[in-house]
Image: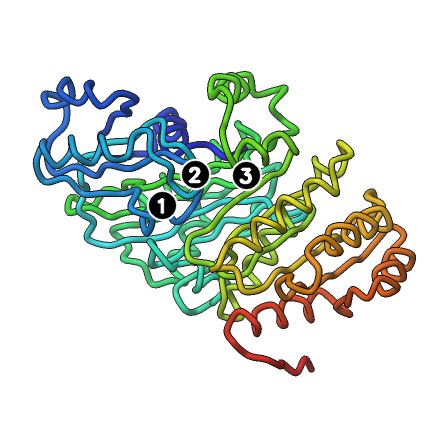
Amino acid sequence: MLLYEHEGKELFAKFGIATPKGAVLVEADDLSRLQSELTLPLMVKAQILSGGRGKAGGVRKADTWPDAARAVRDLLGSDLKGHEVKRVLLEQVAAPTEEYYLAIFALGGEIQVMIGTRGGMEVENSFQQEGQGFTRIAVDPQYGLGEYQIRQALERLNVDRQLWPPFVDCAVRMARLFFQYDATLVEINPLARTADGSMVALDSKVVIDDGALYRQPEIYDIKMSRGPVIGLARQMSNLDIQYTPFEGGNVGLVSSGAGAGVAIMDWVAREGARLSAFVDLDYSIMNDKTERAIELVYGTFMNDSSVKSVIVNFTSCGLRLDEIADSLTRVFSKFGTARKPTFINLQGNRQAVARAKLEEAGIPLSPSLRQAVMSAVAVSRGVEHVDIA
């Protein structure tokens, strides 16, 4: 379950992670009450569960209260990237002197922290570039994140030692949030250093494991309070699709498991491209909604002009790959030859049967996940052919 930015920041506040002073509005007429609470200039930020809102006009700076009023009225009730804007977040502008990246996430059977000496838009292009401003830390799930690990990472990155104490404090608090709330991802991008040397989270991305909501009543209540969703978001929800969009990407990913998705996202970034969205179909498959879910997701990618290629990856011991292959065959037959370049990797339970079914249907498969990733990246970059050693 992906939280709205303001919901993630509310969790940050509970753990003592600093964020800009702000307030959420659901009615434009309520803006007047904030004039005694907030100081100009402000950032007016549409609250939607999608990336790319800045480029779509969903984040605006307001230097005056009339500017803020216009931004709020324009955004509330509007359709932004297929989502109805039901609330906006107004925040005081926190002018950073430097921007960093900080995240903790589940990757397969591991938990990792990533630290970067730069943050903000396009930062995903630099993931996995050890020695180029980013480094990773393996976190022991029993011991947790050690302060010494953060200090060692900051030393590797040549970060100013004066910044170590507030950075370490923020990272440790974020890790506590991650474990206490059964998160699969907690990301701060950017994490800003301000003029007084403090660290402030300018944005938040928090994803909670849907399978753990039964022991997270606070998060479950948030989910129930959102009410019905509309449009594409509602269709995704009805089909139990875990859809995580990213800003500015051009490679679509359909997969099973959040860990595999994060690994492929990093791999794609290392090769010079970016995901437009990661789609986890585990719950759809387990709830017998496989074909309808694949059709909706693939149709979404087909209608998105920014998506140039698609990776389909299912690596599983539990899921029956032959049944997934049947669904892929029927869905692809509906799209015909017009479908976008798609690179499929199937590994695991009934793999041979699944591959045989797709080959019989004339649907090409990649010999490996590496081949699928490299080929999809090549197509996204306008390269017609790529040799894989």
Q: How far apart are marks 3 and 2 (CA)?
A: 9 Å
Label 2 sits on a secondary structure element that is helix
Q: Residues within 10 Å of mark 2 (few under 14, many from 20)?
A: some
Tell me the quarter of the image containing the C terminus.
Answer: bottom right
Residue corresponding to mark 1: 53
Q: Earlier in the sequence, mark 3 or mark 2?
A: 3
Q: Distance between the residues labelled 3 and 1?
A: 34 Å
Q: Which residue is drawn at 55% across and 79% down?
A: 383
Label 1 sits on a secondary structure element that is loop
Q: Is residue 72 left or right of residue 1?
A: left
Q: Position of residue 266 (x, y in %)?
A: 54, 59
Q: Distance between the residues labelled 2 and 1?
A: 29 Å
The residue under label 3 is which amino acid type? Gly
Q: Residues within 10 Å of mark 1 (few under 14, many from 20)?
A: some
Q: Which residue is drawn at 33% across and 58% down?
A: 118
The residue closer to the viewer here, 165 or 14, is: 14
Query: Pointers 3 and 2 in contact (CB under 8 A)?
Result: no
Q: How crowded is mark 3: few (under 14 residues within 10 Å), some or many (20 or more)?
A: some
Q: Earlier in the sequence, mark 2 or mark 1?
A: 1
Q: Where is residue 250 in the image (x, y as percent from the top left)?
A: 50, 61
Which image quadrant is residue 91 in? top left
Q: Which residue is drawn at 61% across and 60% down?
A: 310
Q: Position of residue 147 (x, y in %)?
A: 44, 44
In the rendered image, the vertical position of residue 219 relative to residue 293, given as above or below: above
Q: Residue at x 43, y 40 (%)?
A: 205
Q: In this view, does 338 lie to the left or right of 273?
A: right
Residue corresponding to mark 3: 144
Residue corresponding to mark 2: 172
Which image quadrant is residue 384 in? bottom right
